[in-house]
Amino acid sequence: MKKKRCLIFVICFALCFIINYGTNGGDKDCIFAKEKEENTIQEVSKITLEKNAYVYTGKLIKPKVNIYLKNGKKLNSKSYTLQYRNNRKIGKARVIVKLKGNYTGSKILYFNIVPKQVNVTYVNSTSKGFLMQWKKYNYKITGFQIQYAANRKFKSAKKIWINNNKTSLYNCEKLKKNKIYYLRVRSYKMVSGKRYYSPWSDTKKIKTKKAKIAIDAGHQRRQNSAVEPIGPGAKIYKAKMAGGTKGVATGLYEYELNLILAKKLKETLIKDNYEVFMTRESHDVNISNKERALAVNASKSDILIRIHANGSEAQYVQGASTICCTKNNPYYAKASYGKSRKLSKRILNGIIEKTGCKNCGIEETDTMTGINWCEIPSTIVEVGYMSNLKEDRLLATKTYQNKLVKGMAEGIENYFGF
């Protein structure tokens, strides 16, 4: 009987414990945990866009939004909505983020839509700068910005603004010669008084040319006996273009030899980082001496090399020489006498050194139309006598021609001090 009573007591005690502590205590713990979870997930740490700038496509742009909780987790996209404004055209756009469900609040985020990157299609260096070309845009922008600098990081870069949305070409003529530069370009569009820039184009590296050399291959296939003044304001007239001489042994015409040497010199100078302007590259032209000089002036070259060959009734005469103006030249050439004399000397020395031919010296005269009309330092190079049997044969060989060209190129290098 006592055992039965003890068992009943134990059972009753156990039921009371479960009711008072098991059930109520368990409920309290569950409610606390739920409240803790709700308080945690409602705390949003930050709301950001994946990027702050997007390239124009012509279509609606909808940037991805990232919403982070304080525990570092991302909020599920079902817990918020996104509304976009002004997200097609170039300019400032926005996205409105609205939280929902267990989350409250909203936030406005801004992003830029910018023009497409400029695609540079051509870059060429000159003696004074560079020429850059890029692909034209097929939609409206305001203009372009170009930067160039002597370093890759564009420190202290020069900025050029082009307020023309139709252009695709820029010619710079303000740089130092024989120097490395880095270039890039970007477009921009003005919207509500603010510039929206495209990404920069790929950086281009160029080295400016040492100088610009004008080469005049003397004479042409047909002479022009019409006359022209030998200089500005001159009362003396000469034929626009004389016929030139001819090789007594080879039958090679002077105008042919002159162009052969001019083209070889052009090729050599370009390889040596010079810019070259040619007055003619064909025999079938009709360009007077005055017209050639004026073309050289317009080309903005630094010096002029006029290539010729000599002839004499005395067949024993041979050797190379150069010709420049006199110190008292009454025309344009007067201002460049000193430099023309220096140029003539340097080139003649180069030829003598490379060929070993006779040095016939420097002649000074004011009777040369092609010199008198020229506004830059110039010289006439008489490479040898086609009236001399031995020299005529030499002049017709590639080996001797190459020596002449190397001598002229070396003379040009020495003139500029490279």
Image (cartoon, rainbow, N blue to C red):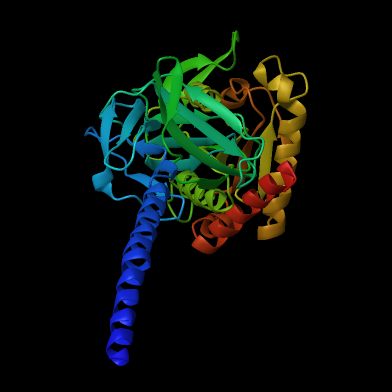
Where 374 sits versus 354, above or below? above
Residue 310 visible in the snapshot: no
Where 197 sits versus 238, above or below? below
Q: Who's the residue at 50% across and 61% down the image? A: 398
| Residue 293 falls in image quadrant | top right
Q: Is residue 322 left or right of residue 203?
A: right
Residue closer to the observer: 283 or 85: 85
Residue 76 visible in the snapshot: yes
Residue 187 placed where, x, y %?
41, 30
Q: Is residue 413 left or right of residue 231?
A: right
Q: Who's the residue at 36% across and 38% down the image? A: 54
Q: Who's the residue at 44% across and 34% down the image? A: 186
| Residue 188 falls in image quadrant | top left
Q: Is residue 252 left or right of residue 367?
A: left
Residue 75 placed where, x, y %?
34, 50
Residue closer to the observer: 359 or 71: 71
Residue 164 placed where, x, y %?
39, 20
Q: How many marks?
A: 0
| Residue 346 falls in image quadrant | top right
Q: Who's the residue at 55% across and 46% down the image? A: 206
